[in-house]
Amino acid sequence: MSTAIAGQKPRLTLAQIINMSVGFFGIQFAFGLQNANVSRIFQTLGAEIEKIPILWIAAPLTGLIIQPIIGHMSDKTWLGKLGRRRPYFLTGALFASLALFIFPGVKALWMAAVMLWVLDASINISMEPFRAFVGDMLPDSQRTTGFAMQSFFIGLGAVISSLLPELLTKMNVANTAAPGVIPDSVRLSFIIGAIVYILAISYTVLTTREYSPEEMKSFGEIDQDTHSINIKTTAQAFYKRGSIWAIIGVILCAILFFYNKNAAHPLAKELYVLTGGITVYGLLQLISGIFKASDKKNGFLEVMDDLNFLPSTMKKLAIVQFFSWFALFSMWIYTTTALSQHIAGTTDTTSEAYNNMGNWVGVLFAWYNGFAAVFAFLLPVLAKKLSRPVTHMIALIVGGLGLISFYFFKDENLLVISMAGVGLAWCSILAMPYSMLTQALPANKMGVYMGIFNFFIVIPQILAATLLGFFTKDLFNGQAIYTIVLGGCSMIVAALLTLRIKDK
C-alpha cells in the first residue's frame, strides 16, 4: 500500500487502482454479451416480441435477493489472505463462466430463460462487492477516480464483447443458422467471454491486498466489531411497516385480478410481479417484527433493519438511479427489435437483414461503451470543477437526448452520434452515484448498503420487464422505437432529480 499519514487511509498509486479495477473488465465482458445478444437468442428460440421483457424477469428478481445478502456477508467476511470482498469475486466468476459456456448451446426458450437467471445472478455475486471494494480501499478524495477507472474497464470490456459477433462474422464464422438454432458467431462469443471473465477476476484477486479489520479500525473506518448486530427498528415499527405494505400489495393484486377478470382488454399479467413484490416486502417486514420481538438477531433481521434507515443521500440517489436504469433497460431490451423495424423494415429473425441489424446493434453498443471508456477520464476533472451532482445531471441530459434521437436518425451510421450521448450518460451512471454515495455510508455497512442501493437497478429492470411489453404492444402498436424514446425521457427525468442532491 502507499504511504499514509498515521490514522488516515493511504492514497493508492495509479497502478494499484488499475489492478483493483481489472476484474470489472471481465464482469462487463459478460454483461455486454448478455445485453447485446440475449433478446436475439430469445427471439431465435421463438419468443414473441411482447414476451421478451418478461423472459428477463427471473434474473433481476434473483438479484434483488442476492445483492443485499452478498453485501451483508462480505461486510462480515475475512478469510485471511483472500480478504473480505475477493472471495465473492471468485465465486461469482466461476459460476458466471460456467453459465457462459452453457448458454449458447440451449435448444429451448425455457432453458435460455434459466441460463439468463444463472448468469445474471452469478454476475451480481461478483459485481456487488466490487462497488464496496472501492469504498474500502480508497479515501474519499480518490473514489471518483476509482469508480471512473471501473467505468473505463467497463467500457473497454463492453466494446470488445459487443463487437465479438461482428468480428467473428468477418472471420467467416456463421452469423445465421436454421430456425431455432443460435448462430455460431454468438455461441463462440459466449465461450470467449467465459475465459475472459475468469482471467480478469483472477488478476485482480492476485494483485490486490485488502485492508484487514484491524487496519480499517486504525483508519477510523470501523468503530465497532463488524460481527455485532445492532437492530434499531422496534418490533412495533416492523409490524406497522409490514402491515401497511402488505395491505397495499394485496389491494393492488385484488384490483388487478378483478379488473382483468371482467375487462375486454385485460392488463398485462406481468404486473402481478410488481404487486406481488410489494406484498412480499410487507410480509418480510412482519417476519422481521417477529424476530425482533423474540430477540432473535440474525443477518436477515439486520438487512431489513438497514432498509429502514437509509441515509438521506442514498434515498435521493436511489430515485435518480431508478429513472436512469429504466432508460437503460429500455435500450438493452429493445434496440435490436426497434432498429430492425424502424430502419431495416423487418421482424423476421431468420432474415439476413434482421441478423445484420443484430450485429450492428452490437457495434453500436461497442461505440457507446467506447465513448464511456474515454469520457471516464473526464469525469474527475468535471466533478472537481462543477461538483458531482451537476456533472451527473449534464451527462444524463445528453444521454436522454441520445436515446430520443434514435427516432430521427434513419441511417444506422448516424446512430453513432446517439451513442456518444449514451456513452457519456453510461460512464457517469457507473461512477458518479457511487462516488457520491460512499462518502455517506458507514464503512462497516458499505457492502450491505451497496447491495440495497442496487435495488434501484433491479426494480426498474423488473418494471421494464413487466411494463415495456405492454407499452410496446398496446400503447405503441408494436413499434419498439417509441419504447426507446420513452427511455430517453426517463433519463432526462433522472437528470432533473439530481438537483436535489448536495455534494459534500
Image (cartoon, rainbow, N blue to C red):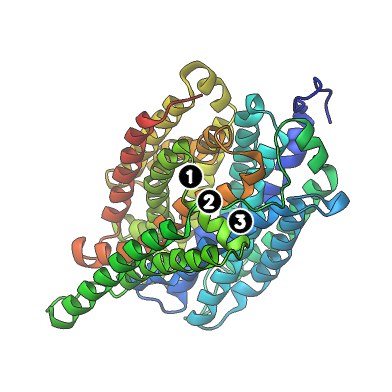
Marks 3 and 1 sit apart, C-alpha to C-alpha, by 41 Å
Left or right: where 405 falls relative to 10 = left
Front residue (pair 370, 452): 452
- To which residue does mark 2 refer? 306
- To which residue does mark 1 refer? 310
Left or right: where 109 falls relative to 25 = left
Residue 199 in view (yes/no): yes
Residue 374: percent from the left, percent from the top?
A: 57, 32
Give the quadrant of residue 295.
Answer: bottom right
Residue 191: percent from the left, percent from the top?
A: 69, 66
Left or right: where 476 falls relative to 372 = left
Residue 454 in view (yes/no): no
Tell us which disc is closer to us: 3 or 1: 1
Residue at x 54%, y 76% (from the top left corner):
114
Identify which amino acid the numbered label 3 is placed on.
Answer: Leu
Identify which amino acid the numbered label 2 is placed on.
Answer: Asp
Labelled disc at residue 372: none
Quick one: quadrant of the N terminus? Answer: top right
Residue 237: percent from the left, percent from the top?
A: 42, 56
Q: Are marks 2 and 1 in contact (CB under 8 Å)?
A: yes
Above or below, comparing residue 498 to residue 86 in the picture? above
Mark 1 Cα shell of 10 Å, populated few (<14), some (14-19), many (≥20): some
* Of pointers 3 and 1, the one earlier in the residue sequence: 3
Kind of element beneath mark 1 = loop
Tell us which disc is closer to us: 2 or 3: 2
